[in-house]
Amino acid sequence: MSDTLLEVEDLRIGATVYPPGEAPKEIGIVHGVSFTLEKGKVLGLIGESGAGKSTIGLASMAYGRGGCRITGGKVKLNGTDILQIPKSGVRNLRGSGVCYVAQSAAAAFNPAHRLGDQIVEATVLHGVSSRSEAMARADHLFEVLGLPNPKEFGQRYPHQVSGGQLQRAMTAMALCSQPDLIVFDEPTTALDVTTQIDVLAAIKHAIEETGTAALYITHDLAVVAQVSDDIMVLRHGKTVEYGPVSQIIETPQEDYTRELVSVRSNIKPQADDQSDALLMIENIDAAYGNSLQVLFDVSFHLPKGQTLAVVGESGSGKSTTARVITGLLPQSSGRVTFDGRVLAPKLSDRPREDLRALQMIYQMADVAMNPRHTVREIIGRPLTFYFGLRGKEREKRVLELLDQIEMGGSFIDRYPAELSGGQKQRVCIARSLAADPKLIICDEPTSALDPLVAEGILKLLMELQEETHVSYLFITHDIATVRAIADSIAVMYQGRLVRFGPKDQVLSPPFDDYTDLLLKSVPEMELGWLEKALSERKMAAAGN
Amino acid sequence: MSNASTSPPASKGSAGGFFSSNPLLALILQRIFLGFILLLAISALLFIGIEVLPGDFAQAYLGQSATPEAIANIRKELGLDAPLLERYFGWLGGVLQGDFGTSWANKASVSEQIGKRLGNTLFLAFWAAVVSVPLAIGLGMIAVHYRNRFIDRLINVISLAAISLPEFFTGYLLILFFAVNWGIAIFPSTVFADMSFGDRLAAIALPCATLVLVVLAHMMRMTRAAILNIMSSAYIETAELKGLDAFRIIAKHAAPNAIAPIINVVALNLAYLVVGVVVVEVIFVYPGMGQYLVDAVTIRDMPVVQACGLVFAAVYIILNMLADVLGILANPRLRHPK
């Protein structure tokens, strides 16, 4: 009797798509993937979106999301092919033998029931243990996972706890029935880095303590390197490379894997002269409504033709700062100076020239464009609005802009739905460039994109800056991006500016406490990073 | 449910502090207050509406023998010569004390009549609701389970056919088959004060069935739509991946989150069971509010019309208010604040 738990052989998954105006057709999503997982081991599945990693994870529970169908191959769990057993057998397996941890625990918990009831539900229903035993085990798991007040945690409703806690609660739910296998589907992707490291450590600790095996799905190689024994790199539904974690990280064989490993190595040097300010904000306070103050005395400046990165976790006030600069949220006190003049706080009081010179790019490119407009109309509209261009002139300029974003004229008649994620963001960049702005505020423009696509967008932005000398205010939570593109950095925490200055200075010690925590929480592509970071943290805490 | 005495002490001791520490109670009190204002506005509208209607009780009452003097006499006797505002506030004052005045036609107390009639109408509405609400929600859940398959379509088609037939037609069809051809139901459905409970139930079988058929489709389709909407949520996938069976997923995980829209439609239909029964009561000769109102309108018996109108409005507002409050209570975010 070997220790093999899960054996996937030549797994094939397909779906039916319904393209508008055409006959439905069959497409393949996963093309013959095979792997084995031993008891108590962790296999990392990594790849960009559309690589089929979640689909494979769900297939190991005999589940097809949306219209996905398993069209071939075997999924053997403890020697039984679970694709061949009847529905009731599959139902008994899910929630007791194999459990699932979703990417967004906030959406995956039922808002109508208490966490404790949801966590023990499957365990009790499948007859694994009695309700009181399951409750006791859940309490124990809350403690293992480092949740606050483990005895009372189960009494809470999902909306009463934070995102990081929900993600740990979801892990507790998966562990409660003592399954042989857990499928983790991007469990830390939606979290801030400072929260991610805690959740990651909790998951790793819980896996070690319970001896369960796991499939760990993520697009972040640095994260998966911390928890896995083996890694499988996937692309377009096929295996690119499969092997022990040390081999994948240290001696990758395939070009694609090498690209993934080295994706964060491109770093731009900071500009020397940072005195000639284009944008200056001084002592900004801002509040939503009359009571909820979100910005406290924020001041920084952005030199001409350079990039200022504003960094912080969600709720730190970085997007609110952008709203104040654009005039969407007038500040309650303080001053915004742009190009030598003080800007009117309210958007409606600003002249069109100010609107033109200050453009925005958003995180969600697909909702920032009118889905019923073609690329021509999307890019052409600011040309008509600001410069009165029409007809042939406008067409010529749109084509120039499309060349500038490296897409070309063949895209001019496409609708947003016919573009990929990266292409959508490029069109948004072209739209903001069309206004010939002095400053573009980029609000997390790459965080919804796959690493390699994001890398392409960042490169494009840097090239455009060389050509047009446009300045960027770049809002992000990703330190790697900051290192790559910024000239100066502003670190924000709970509505206050905690650190500001040229990049090299901000990223060099001595650090303030928050910047230190932030920098140390960023996963590095290095084996054993997690343990090192955690022990450093403990030592720092002991030192205090 | 927390109330003022068990809730933690208000932070400031002022009314503002009380409401901010009990947001749920504040919301509910606000709904009740709004309902009361609405009812007042409706009473004024009713009064004005009736005032501007053509036709006159004295004229209708006297018929052929209406001379100008006789009409003036009757108007004076009924107090119709007083100014509009005076009459409105006099009437409103009475209503607030539970006195709806006396009928012009037979000098009987309107409150007393309404007491009996409303009882009958509520009896009919209650039994129609007892049958139709669980049936509609159950059918809705079954339709969700078999969505886009034969059973779902069958439920949809039948309930749609039932709602598409005018209720008088449905009523006559039921009379034709159940009372006339097969003789297994009672017609007319008149009930009397000294009838036994069983006899009463037997008497209202046909009007009750008619009402059920009329309100079923609306509630069923809303239940189906609301639950289907929830079925694409991530937490339903979670439930499926926990290996729960289909019925448990629909009933335990989907339905509680679909409850607010369902409650609203149920309330609208319950209101219809009370307010919209006019036609059904007339067809089945059932002595409820509807028939009372129709009789009063024919002879321009204004106190009765006003009283019926106000009672109908109150039922409507109370049921919708109840739906609002239940909808608020169904939201765990409001029930269990952070």
Image: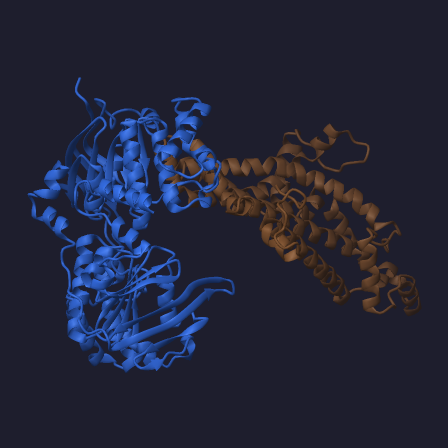
Chain colours: A blue, B brown
Residue A448, given in percent of the width and then of the height, sits at: 27, 55
Which one is in front, B106 or A226?
A: A226
Residue A324, given in percent of the width and then of the height, sits at: 39, 69
Residue at 82 percent of width and 49 percent of height: B111
- The correct choice, above or below, for A329 with respect to B3 in the image is below
Q: In this view of the protein, can residue A226 be seen by the observer?
A: yes
- The correct choice, above or below, for A82 with respect to A149 in the image is above
Q: In this view of the protein, can residue A9 be seen by the observer?
A: no
Q: On the rendered image, what quadrant is the N terminus of chain A found in? A: top left
In the displayed orientation, state which residue is furthest to the top.
A1
Which one is in front, B329 or A367?
A: B329
Residue B71, given in percent of the width and then of the height, sits at: 89, 66
Numbered-mark total: 0
Which one is in front, A493 or B255?
A: A493
Residue B206, given in percent of the width and then of the height, sits at: 66, 36
* Among the 4 quarters of the image, the one containing residue A78: top left
**Left or right: where does residue B220 sit relative to residue A376?**
right
- The correct choice, above or below, for B259 with respect to A121 in the image is below
In the displayed orientation, state which residue is furthest to the front.
A543
**Left or right: where does residue B24 sit relative to residue A536?**
right
Which one is in front, A35 or A130?
A: A130
- The correct choice, above or below, for B304 with respect to A301 in the image is above
